[in-house]
Image (cartoon, helix red, strand yellow):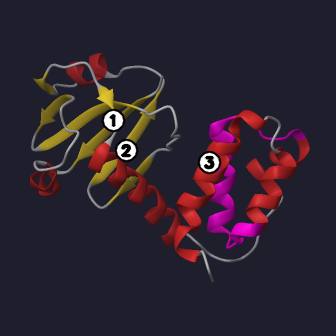
Amino acid sequence: MRYIDIMIAPEWVKDFKGLDGVETRLLYKQGYCIMTYFEPTDCHFEHLGKDGIQISISDEDKLDHYLTNNWQLVRDMTPKYLSGKVLDLVNALQISTDKSNRNGYGLSLTGIVDNAFCYGISTKAEIVSFVRQCYRSGIGQEKVYLYLTTVLRTSKLNKFLLDEVNKYYKEEVGV
C-alpha cells in the first residue's frame, strides 16, 4: 500500500473545500495543507508538481517527518483511499503534465523502453512509466497497445494496461 500526500499552496486551498473525498488526514503549515491518502489498488501515480499542487508518493507514512518539521495535525484520521473528485483531479494533473511535455520526437530505446524490450514488463509501475514515455514521445495509441502486448509478462495486468492507455489516449479515439 502506497501513501499519496497532496500538498496544496495557500492560493489553492479554498478550491478544495467543496471537493468530495477530503475526509482524510489533514496537516497545515503557513497556509499550506497536506492531505494524505492511500493509493487505490487500480492506480499507480508518480511524483508531480504543478500549479500550486505537489503530489508525493511513498511506501511509508511520512506523518512523523511532517510533525518533526512543525506541521500541525488538523484532522487526525487514518488516511482514506483516494477517490471521487480528488482522484479525478490527480488523474487530470498527471495527464495534463504529460500532455504539456509531449514532444513527438519518437521513442528512444533508453530507460524504461529499453528495459521493457529487453526484460519485459511485469508491474503496474512499469506499465505507467512505459505508457507515459510513449505518450510524451508522440507514439499513437495503437502502437502503444502493440508494444505493450509484446513486452507484457503477465496477463493479470491486461485490464490495468487497457485502462492506463485509454486514460491517456481517450481524446484521440476516432482520430
Q: CA distance from mark 1 to mark 2?
A: 6 Å
Quadrant where the C terminus sits is bottom right
Q: Position of residue 32 (x, y in %)?
A: 16, 43
Boundaries of the magenta span:
119-142
Q: Which mark is residue 55?
A: 2
Disc 3 versus disc 1: nearer the observer: 3
Label 3 Cα crowd, 10 Å radius (few <14 / some 14-19 / many 20+): some
Q: Which residue is drawn at the image coordinates 74% and 62% (left, top)?
A: 144
Q: Position of residue 122 (x, y in %)?
A: 75, 35
Q: Of 21 and 108, which appears nearest the observer? A: 21
Amino acid carrying mark 2 in the image:
Ile
Q: Of 56 and 120, which appears nearest the observer? A: 120
In the rendered view, would you say 171 is above or below 43? below
Q: Which mark is residue 128?
A: 3
Amino acid carrying mark 1 in the image:
Asp
Q: Which residue is mark 1?
A: 5
User: Which tag, 3 or 1, sits closer to the chain's start?
Assistant: 1
Q: Which residue is drawn at the image coordinates 27% and 43% (left, top)?
A: 7
Residue 84, by quadrant, is top left
Label 1 Cα crowd, 10 Å radius (few <14 / some 14-19 / many 20+): many
Residue 81, by quadrant, is top left
Which residue of the protein is positioned furthest toward the right in this rendering? 118
SS for dot 2: strand
Circles 1 and 2, Cβ within 8 Å, touching? The answer is: yes
User: Which tag, 1 or 2, sits closer to the chain's start?
Assistant: 1
Q: Look at the image and say whether residue 35 sits in the magenta stretch.
A: no
